[in-house]
């Protein structure tokens, strides 16, 4: 093991740390309710919920993107902030299976 | 060298300028001192070449900016004290762990509450365990001289730690004293440019102070402790080199007077040393075998040096300007742990001058005499306290 001066390392080493197993709850997005507004994305302290294009629809003759929130479960810490701030209550925090008795 | 009558602020700021810093950053409002104001004036006048002067929104911000700047390989400086230092403290622990040789002057002042802006050592003592080198200076010449030495020690590759030059607020910072101001050529010959082995650049990004889970965290702490211990030798060498260069010998990690045959050692740090030395000299004239031990480096602590000079003394009298509440004065605590098993002297420690309370000469003399004559109990005492009634509502 090498101990570097000032604990200096190559960047992005945090990517190797999958922190997704730290929390007890998952955020689950109900795509019926999600309007793709992006509020959750703005609030997530770990930048692991993102609004992405999932399809297209025609509105008044114009093509519009359909966007929905997608959670990166590898890094989501389950803090529940996204669920708290979602204006349409599209996110529910669900207890992970391993914690169910 | 030109001798000028200058204030402590200026003596320090002028020395910083001669060290050619690349980034100076400070929070410019209370409890800031005129050190950075003087530097700002020098910057505005174009006297600081290749330097960026940044004013931050808080001390936390100032320290954070310096962490970033120092990681890029910049020579950095800041000054703060009191609540400002406490606000910086979270960042400074990181600076130490990231091994960034930021040099800062602490214009020692008390901590709130109750609100006080006057002098004592409580602020820097609160940073005692952060792996930051702490040197306490006695006068403005020593403060002026310490700045180039601080950079040379902190930037030594065996050390690579932040460095606090602690000078008493008001007592020194605001005082006019004659100071032999260094010359640029002299400082240039003494202090090479800072060129660390690892630098943060936009082309080659790095993580400083990375995540260290339990399987490797302790090892980082071990190397920090080693760096602190190696600093002792580096400091001795740099102090010696300084004495040869300037003819001003301030001593090593400690400096002593009349200790050869002393039965009673009086220990002090910072500006009060001057007064204590005079009292010791007067007592010598009265035939009392008293000596002075001035602690210059509080971190790293001069354990071996103190063991050597205290070997045969009977009484140790410590004057200090801080309290570790619930125990006693921090200098006495460390002194006793250093001497345990090496010296059987009785230790009397006196907290004096807290929150800018005046320390009269008679008080120093009385404390030393009381200790010698056994008129006071061993251990910790507050001295110079008025009669008062404690009201518990
Ligand atoms: S805040 Fe709610 S509605 Fe907006 S994108 Fe996120 S989940 Fe969808
Ligand atoms: S639970 Fe917290 S960490 Fe996970 S996606 Fe929501 S805001 Fe982000």
Image: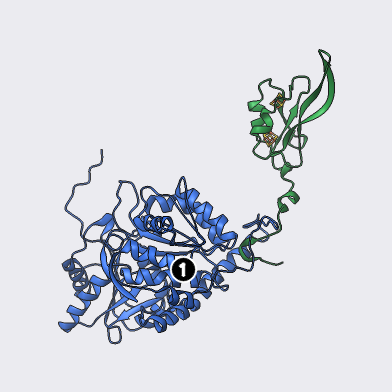
Chain colours: A green, B blue
Residue B2 visible in this rendered orientation of the protein? yes
Q: Which quadrant would residue B275 be assigned to in this image?
A: bottom left
Q: Which quadrant would residue B244 be assigned to in this image?
A: bottom left
Query: The C terminus of chain B is located in which quarter?
Result: top left
Residue B137 drawn at (x, y percent) = 35, 69
- Check the image and name the residue furthest to the bottom: B261
Q: Which residue is mark 1?
A: B19
Nearer to us in this view, B42 or A13: B42
- Residue A70 lies left or right of residue B244; in this view the side is right
Residue B58 drawn at (x, y percent) = 45, 46
- Check the image and name the residue furthest to the top: A60
Residue A68 drawn at (x, y percent) = 77, 27
Residue B134 drawn at (x, y percent) = 43, 66
Residue at 19% x, 47% y is B389
Q: Which quadrant would residue B257 be assigned to in this image?
A: bottom left
- Residue A90 lies left or right of residue B378; in this view the side is right
Query: The N terminus of chain B is located in which quarter?
Result: bottom left
């Amino acid at each position: 093991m090498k101990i570097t001066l000032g604990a200096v390392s190559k960047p992005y080493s945090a990517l190797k740390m999958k922190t997704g197993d730290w929390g007890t709850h998952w955020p689950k997005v109900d795509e019926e309710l999600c309007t793709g507004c992006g509020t959750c994305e703005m609030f997530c302290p770990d930048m692991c919920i993102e609004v992405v294009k999932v399809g297209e629809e025609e509105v008044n003759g114009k093509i519009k993107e359909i966007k929905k929130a997608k959670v990166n479960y590898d890094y989501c810490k389950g803090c529940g902030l996204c669920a708290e701030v979602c204006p349409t209550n599209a996110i529910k925090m669900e207890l992970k299976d391993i914690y169910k008795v | 060298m030109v001798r000028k009558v200058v204030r402590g602020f200026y003596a320090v700021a002028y020395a910083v300028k001669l060290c050619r810093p690349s980034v100076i950053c400070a929070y410019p409002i209370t409890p800031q001192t005129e050190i950075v104001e003087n530097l700002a004036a020098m910057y505005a006048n174009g006297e600081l070449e290749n330097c960026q002067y940044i004013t931050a929104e808080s001390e936390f911000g100032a320290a954070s900016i310096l962490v970033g700047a120092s990681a890029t390989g910049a020579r950095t400086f800041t000054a703060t004290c009191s609540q400002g230092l406490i606000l910086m403290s979270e960042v400074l622990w990181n600076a130490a762990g990231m091994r960034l040789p930021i040099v800062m002057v602490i214009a020692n002042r008390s901590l709130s509450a109750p609100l006080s802006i006057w002098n004592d050592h409580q602020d820097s003592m609160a940073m005692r365990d952060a792996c930051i080198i702490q040197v306490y200076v006695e006068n403005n010449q020593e403060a002026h001289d310490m700045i180039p030495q601080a950079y040379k020690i902190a930037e030594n590759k065996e050390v690579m730690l932040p460095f606090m030059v602690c000078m008493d607020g008001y007592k020194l910072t605001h005082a006019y004293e004659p100071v032999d101001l260094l010359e640029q050529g002299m400082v240039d010959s003494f202090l090479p440019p800072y060129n660390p082995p690892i630098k943060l650049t936009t082309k080659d990004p790095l993580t400083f102070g990375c995540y260290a889970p339990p399987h490797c965290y302790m090892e980082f702490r071990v190397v920090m402790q080693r760096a602190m211990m190696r600093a002792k030798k580096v400091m001795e060498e740099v102090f010696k080199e300084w004495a040869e260069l300037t003819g001003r010998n301030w001593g090593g990690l400690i400096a002593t007077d009349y200790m050869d045959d002393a039965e009673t050692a009086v220990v002090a740090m910072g500006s009060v040393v001057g007064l204590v030395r005079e009292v010791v000299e007067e007592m010598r004239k009265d035939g009392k075998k008293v000596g002075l031990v001035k602690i210059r480096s509080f971190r790293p602590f001069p354990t071996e040096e103190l063991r050597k000079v205290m070997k045969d003394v009977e009484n140790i009298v410590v004057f200090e300007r801080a309290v570790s509440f619930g125990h006693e004065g921090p200098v006495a605590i460390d002194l006793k742990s250093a001497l345990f098993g090496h010296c059987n002297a009785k230790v009397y420690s006196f907290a004096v001058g807290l929150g800018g309370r005046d320390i009269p000469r008679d008080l120093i003399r009385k404390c030393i005499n009381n200790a010698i004559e056994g008129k006071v109990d061993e251990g910790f005492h507050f001295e110079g306290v008025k009669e008062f009634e404690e009201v518990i509502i």
